[in-house]
Image (cartoon, grey):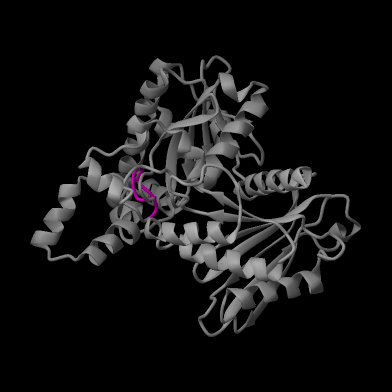
Amino acid sequence: MSPVLVVNSGSSSFKYQLIDTDTQRPLASGLVERIGEGIGRATHKVHFSETDAEAVAALDATYERELPIPDHTAGFRVMLDAFAEHGPSLEETPPVAVGHRVVHGGARFFEPTLVTPLVEINIDELSVLAPLHNPGALQGIRAARAAFPDLPHVAVFDTAFHQTLAPAAYTYAIDRELAQAHRIRRYGFHGTSHKFVSEAAAAFLGRPTAELRQIVFHLGNGASVTAVDGGRSVETSMGLTPLEGLVMGTRSGDIDPAALLQLARRAGMSIDDLDDLLNKRSGVLGLAGVSDMRDVEAGVEKGDAAAVLAFDVYIHRLRAYAGAYLAQLGGVDVISFTAGVGENSAATRAGALATLGFAGVEIDSVRNQTRGRGIRVISTDASRVTVLVVPTNEELEIARQTVEVAAGLVDAA
């Protein structure tokens, strides 16, 4: 057994999973939240396999606790207490390493990286590019290293998969020296998910990733699409930040920059006001008043005009990117949908691809409407392009990359 503890840390919370990388199965998972807010909350779930006798009486047992959690270090103590009290025992199944999700690696990190004091400094310096994400990740890393001082800690960056973008794809057409001075370029995000899904799709089809042209739609509350050519990211919708690109739950996606100048001049909005507008009060929330696509689709069924417009705008943007990436790839072999909306919304999948018949894309309506837990084909047998629903597993991908780094340390010793 090769368990890896995967940590996804934010400024006031962190999620974790203990994953057996041999079986690719989670042994336990949890969430520690409301850190530094007086009374915090911790949830710990033990995952039983189908062969465990305990599963008969208690499948996926969940334990909750409320108590003061002043900082991330205290949060990790709460997590360790949960493992000790409810299992699995970290003494009997000790993790071989700890993997950390870090949102922004800038242009410095293009592979999973062993955390050192210098790496911590670099993550801190990159916080200017991800002020809402990297500081929380760094707090989690430091707390985890204090809790597990003898284990290797590995940072896996959301931006790393997109480091294969060509200069033509990542360069913005603004003053070159100004852009270089302030590191203004497209970095892309959701890279861990896009990597996992594109490789899982190839494995499912029994074909090498090197021979496939793929488009991957990661559609959750945050949403992005990536063109993957031969296993390499060649184009992606998110940019300097996760704000660019598709319409999302609360984010605007693409918008004419002059609209912001207009709002600043005519509506008196400040930089902070605009930041709040674009990231928290836009997207389908701004259009329909709700951010969950299930609520939008329910509104569409009722004939709510705002919901209909929100859905149409959402689909219009998906189609625009699908067409652009078809052109960039020179055709496509596989299109995959993943994340909450991508995996569960048949209407979104059908709408996004409805106009791509010219490119050989044919959706089977029955397959598309049929729910399933694993990877499944939703295109027709006659479709020249295979369309898949691929459940993402970013935590497993982080665990895989982490154990590779840890194994390399053993080999080098």
Q: Quadrant of residue 116?
A: bottom right
Is residue 338 something one can see in this rendering? no
Provide residue 133's location: percent of width, then percent of height: 46, 60
Residue 123 inside the magenta-drawn segment: no
Give 300 or 278, whichever is nearer the viewer: 278
Relative to residue 390, is residue 100 depicted above or below? below
Residue ID at (31%, 60%):
281
In the displayed structure, 371 sits above or below 12; it is above
Compared with 100, 188 (above or below) is above
| In-front residue for pair 9/368 | 9
Chief secondary structure of the magenta portion: loop
Image spot of residue 136 (x, y percent)? 50, 66
Q: Measuring 34% from the left and 27% from the top, which residue is drawn there?
A: 324
Residue 412: x and y in percent read 75, 44
Q: In the picture provided, is 191 more to the left or to the right than 62?
A: left
Q: Residue at x 45, y 16 (%)?
A: 360
Nearest the eye: 14 or 371? 14
Q: Position of residue 64 (x, y in %)?
A: 68, 74
Left or right, residue 364 beside residue 331: right
Range of the magenta residues?
242-249
